[in-house]
Amino acid sequence: MDNATKKTHRILNLENGRNFRELGGYKTLDGKTIKYHKALRSAGLGDLSDKDVNFLGNYGLKTDIDFRSIDEAAKKPDKMPKGTKYVSLPVFKEDETEASKIQGTSIPDLDYVPIDGYNHMLEAYLDMVNGPQAKLAYQNFFSELLANSNNDEVLLFHCSAGKDRTGMGAFFLMSALNVPMTTIKDDYLLTNKASKSFIDHLLSQVVEHEPTLVDTIKALMTVNINYLETAQKAIEETSGSIDNYIREELKVSDHDISDLKKIYLM
């Protein structure tokens, strides 16, 4: 196992990549462990350096799942190793999280930013649970996870910031693998650490130019456990439990769950 995959190096340090994280090493409730070099989560791949692309190729990247909208992906296409399978699975028709707009916009021009970023994000999370397009995207995500069956072949899934659409993808995957909810929530919140330098820089610009927007931008560009727990509550109201939701709404059968565990656990 190389240095990047030691448990103390869950966050992968790429030159121009942000919020790249290894899911390997997490323990399940029944004593299994998620394999390394099988599943990565990240922010966008559009700014990667040649060194970053080579790193991902050597790491074993074979499948790139892009949860961004068609428009987002067209504006900043992924850079990936030659031979990587690219799969577009838009969770939203347009980026409801606003992450893509904020990352590519000068702070003084943020005239589109919602007044209440916190409640805007709560609505986005509800749409990721209840929206037909989101359900279809995550159904197809599981199909790709099941197809990623060769040892040491990596599936990476991402959106623009790697926090909301990607966070829900990780929530669904780790729930299916029987990872404890406390671990899932800790991984979800790790985005704030993995993206800290970017967020700090962004907020310093906001303070200088539009101080009234600080709370809203922070709500849009960080994760908050209330966001995930709002989705969790909606899932329980819809299906009774996350396990039922994955089976009924995301069409993942008991046989699929068994296969996922064979592929991703050791």
Image (spheres, helix red, strand yellow):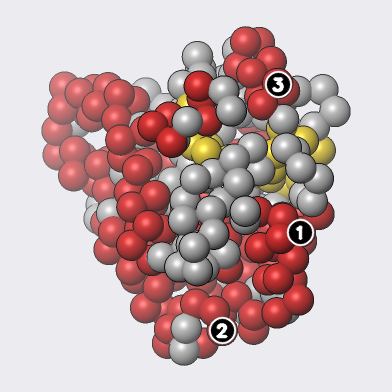
Tell me, yes or no, whether the two marked residues, 3 and 2, touch with CB atoms within 8 Å: no
Q: Left or right: where does residue 4 sit relative to residue 46?
A: left
Q: Is residue 262 in view from this perspective?
A: yes
Pointer 1 local density, CA inside 10 Å: few below 14, some 14–19, many at least 20 = some
Q: Give the amino acid at mark 3.
A: Asn
Q: Residue at x 54, y 59 (%)?
A: 32
Residue denoted by label 2 = 244
Pointer 3 local density, CA inside 10 Å: few below 14, some 14–19, many at least 20 = few
Considering only order in the chain, which callout, 2 or 3, is on the residue closer to the N terminus? Answer: 3
Residue denoted by label 3 = 58
Considering only order in the chain, which callout, 1 or 2, is on the residue closer to the N terminus? Answer: 1
Tell me, yes or no, whether the two marked residues, 2 and 1, touch with CB atoms within 8 Å: no
Distance between the alpha carbons at the discs numbered 1 and 3: 22 Å
Q: Which mark is residue 88?
A: none
Distance between the alpha carbons at the discs numbered 2 and 1: 19 Å
Q: Position of residue 55 (x, y in %)?
A: 64, 18
Q: Secondary structure at mark 3?
A: helix
Residue denoted by label 1 = 146
Q: Position of residue 91 (x, y in %)?
A: 60, 57
Q: Position of residue 154 (x, y in %)?
A: 70, 39
Please say if 144 is above or below 172. above
Q: Give the amino acid at mark 2.
A: Asn
